[in-house]
């Protein structure tokens, strides 16, 4: 199946030691999962509303009242997929719906993190498994996002699961394994696109990168075509729903609106003072601009304003990678659970603290945080890439969704919330970057002998 069989994880101390390491790694994710379940049952309502939480719940209410073909405007403006999942979960309990959502999303996140870390343990980059498991469990924004009503946490979990399954296929190369894994990966990516149509682009490139590792172009083309055909099933269902409910042939109708907000002479690249953004007139005799016409209007404006476009590209990139708080913070993460305990946010509440946080010291620290995180991510990508063939595949599968999310933000609005769905893989690459720097430091200082040998794992 593959061009070259990847290196296998050699267990020099027998099967029992392998099982022990697997068990210990699993307990990392399990321990934090149990802690989070206890926390859900302890806090008020069992969770929080995300940035668009009310909209998703109101759309769900439309489904409860009128069924799958509800004419509720929110179901066509936003992708209906996440609200449909909430509708299904509401059958378990409407009184404790937030708790049910939090437990459901936390369980998916736990399974994804545990599986991804276990698959890393079986690869030549096994040393990343334990720190990655800890970081995924402990990162407050990503881990606690499973308590929030929003698609971001499930999409992040589904991406980790998908990559883990592809790693499994490469570790066990056979047509049988591929035929079993492909529908699973496609189904997970289809569910991601059901929640957020932007994931369709990520899905395509995941299958393309995976396909290029197969032995022939015919196999690669078949994998991409079959995978994307399965991925499109659920999004196509959303289109059918919208056609019957509203006469709209689209998954959602908010792409043009978000693109318009991020464009125009007065645009900042984010949610600025002018919430409408670029002015786009309807094409006579129509009196209302359609979503597709808004998209064309924005693209045309970019083509005729190259200087302003480059400025907006920089601004949107800055906003996308900006910290959650502080002078550079820009986006719709005000309901980030981390903000409840964020020391920077709390310091800025006093006049003296605000002067410190938003002055030159705060700006310097924010830029160091932003650029440092980016540098660590790319260092990690390069370190993994140089390891071998399987590692190159893992590196590409991790970095590509991040780049695509970044590009999507540039095309629409600069918002740091847009990077949450890919935070699992960006944190993984940053862990790799930290370990790469540690190894380089140890070699420079003559401590490389302390590094564990591959044969000793």
Image (cartoon, helix red, strand yellow):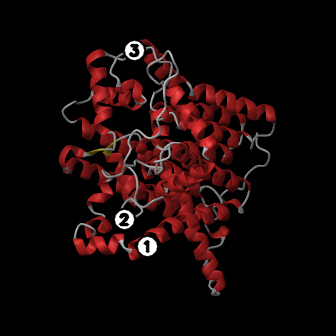
Residue position for label 3:
245
Q: Is residue 62 left or right of residue 387?
A: left
In terms of secondary structure, where does tag 1 sit?
A: helix
Q: Quadrant of residue 451?
A: bottom right
The 10 Å Cα crowd at callout 1, few under 14, some 14 to 19, many 20 or more, is some
How far separated are the C-alphas under marks 1 and 3?
Answer: 50 Å
Say if residue 287 shows up in the picture: yes
Q: Is there a contact, CB below 8 Å, between mark 1 and mark 2?
A: yes
The 10 Å Cα crowd at callout 2, few under 14, some 14 to 19, many 20 or more, is many
Q: Residue at x 27, y 25 (%)?
A: 61
Q: Residue at x 37, y 15 (%)?
A: 69
Residue position for label 1:
365
In terms of secondary structure, where does tag 2 sit?
A: loop
Q: Earlier in the sequence, mark 1 or mark 2?
A: 2
Which disc, if any, is residue 326?
A: 2
Q: Earlier in the sequence, mark 1 or mark 3?
A: 3
Q: Is residue 391 left or right of residue 62?
A: right
């Amino acid at each position: 199946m593959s061009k070259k069989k990847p290196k296998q994880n050699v267990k020099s101390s027998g099967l029992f030691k392998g099982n022990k390491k697997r068990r210990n790694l699993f307990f990392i994710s399990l321990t934090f999962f149990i802690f989070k379940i206890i926390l859900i049952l302890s806090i008020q309502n069992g969770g929080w509303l995300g940035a668009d939480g009310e909209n998703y719940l109101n759309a769900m209410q439309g489904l409860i009242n009128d069924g799958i073909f509800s004419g509720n405007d929110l179901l066509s403006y936003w992708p209906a997929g996440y609200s449909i999942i909430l509708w299904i979960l509401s059958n378990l309990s409407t009184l404790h719906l937030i708790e049910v959502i939090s437990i459901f999303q936390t369980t998916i996140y736990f399974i994804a993190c545990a599986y991804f870390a276990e698959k890393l343990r079986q690869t030549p980059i096994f040393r990343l498994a334990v720190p990655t498991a800890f970081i995924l469990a402990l990162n407050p924004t990503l881990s606690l996002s499973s308590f929030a009503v929003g698609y971001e946490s499930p999409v992040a979990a589904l991406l980790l699961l998908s990559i883990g399954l592809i790693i499994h296929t490469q570790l066990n190369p056979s047509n049988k394994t591929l035929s079993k894994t492909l529908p699973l990966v496609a189904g997970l990516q289809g569910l991601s696109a059901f929640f957020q149509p932007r994931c369709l682009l990520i899905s395509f490139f995941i299958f393309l990168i995976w396909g290029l590792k197969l032995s022939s172009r015919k196999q690669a083309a078949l994998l991409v075509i079959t995978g994307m055909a399965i991925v499109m099933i659920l999004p196509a269902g959303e289109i059918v729903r919208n056609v019957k409910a509203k006469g709209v042939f689209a998954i959602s109708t908010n792409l043009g609106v978000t693109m318009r907000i991020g464009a125009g002479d007065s645009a900042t690249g984010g949610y600025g003072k002018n919430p409408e953004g670029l002015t786009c007139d309807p094409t006579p005799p129509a009196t209302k601009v359609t979503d597709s016409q808004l998209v064309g209007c924005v693209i045309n404006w970019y083509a005729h304003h190259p200087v302003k476009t480059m400025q907006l590209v920089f601004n949107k990139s800055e906003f996308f990678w900006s910290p959650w708080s502080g002078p550079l913070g820009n986006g719709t993460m005000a309901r980030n659970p981390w903000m409840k305990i964020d020391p920077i946010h709390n310091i800025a509440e006093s006049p003296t603290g605000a002067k410190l946080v938003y002055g030159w010291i705060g700006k310097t620290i924010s830029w160091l945080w932003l650029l440092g995180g980016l540098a660590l991510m790319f260092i990690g990508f390069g370190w993994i890439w140089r390891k071998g063939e399987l590692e190159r595949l893992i590196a590409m599968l991790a970095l590509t969704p991040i780049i695509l999310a970044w590009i999507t933000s540039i095309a629409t609005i600069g918002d740091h919330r847009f990077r949450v769905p890919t935070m699992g893989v960006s944190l993984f690459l940053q862990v790799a970057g930290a370990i790469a720097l540690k190894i380089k430091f140890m070699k420079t200082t003559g401590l490389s002998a302390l590094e564990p040998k591959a044969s000793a794992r």
